Image (spheres, rainbow, N blue to C red):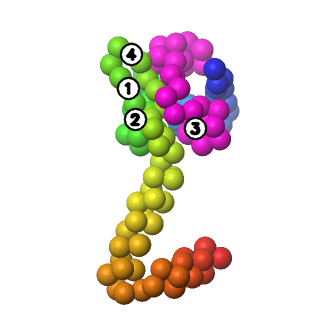
Amino acid sequence: MVRFSIDPGASEPPFEQVRAHVVEAVRDGRLAVGAKLPTVRALADELDLAVNTVAKAYRSLEADAVIETRGRNGTFVAEHGDPAERQLQRAAADYAALARRLGVEASEARTIVDAALA
């Protein structure tokens, strides 16, 4: 199980630290798709935080589709849990559709993207 910690002296509020820790653990693979997260109450106790603080972090993560709550079964890392990757995939699909509409060849569209990333 992944352990999280909160820095009381940090400029980020505790709920944002919890949210950021979960996102980072999903991105780097420490939390795999389908991994069960602690209950709100259990994580609040572990981190010595108010239950509402952890609940706020979980709500934010669920809104970003990083986690999903399955009723009494608990909270789990959602499939495709990385919100940044999902946003990039949507943007890439939109870009590809635009390139096709404009009649731009795939190789030229990739060159344009490579130049933008450089």
The residue stretch that appears in magenta: 22-50
> In the drawing, what numbered circle is on residue 69?
1
Can you say which quadrant of the picture contains the C terminus? Answer: bottom right
Residue position marked by numbered label 2 in the rendering: 62
Residue 44 painted magenta:
yes
The amino acid marked with disc number 4 is Asn
Q: Hey, what amino acid is under mark 2? A: Glu
Q: Residue at x 61, y 73 (%)?
A: 117
| In the image: residue 17, left or right of residue 69 | right
Q: Residue at x 43, y 23 (%)?
A: 75
Is residue 14 found inside the magenta-colored segment of the image?
A: no
First of labels 2, 1 by sequence position: 2
Q: Amino acid at mark 3?
A: Val
Q: Nearer the viewer, mark 2 or mark 4?
A: 4
The amino acid on which the numbered mark 1 sits, given as a three-letter code, is Thr
State which mark lies toward you, 3 or 2.
Answer: 3
Whether 62 is drawn above or below 69: the answer is below
Label 4 crowd (10 A; few <14 / some 14-19 / many >=20): few
Q: Secondary structure at mark 3?
A: helix
Residue 57, disc: none
Residue that badge 4 annotates: 73
> Mark 3 touching mark 2, by CB under 8 A?
no
**Looking at the rendered structure, which numbered label has been put on residue 26?**
3
Task: Please report whichever mark, 2 or 4, sits nearer to the chain's N-terminal start.
Answer: 2
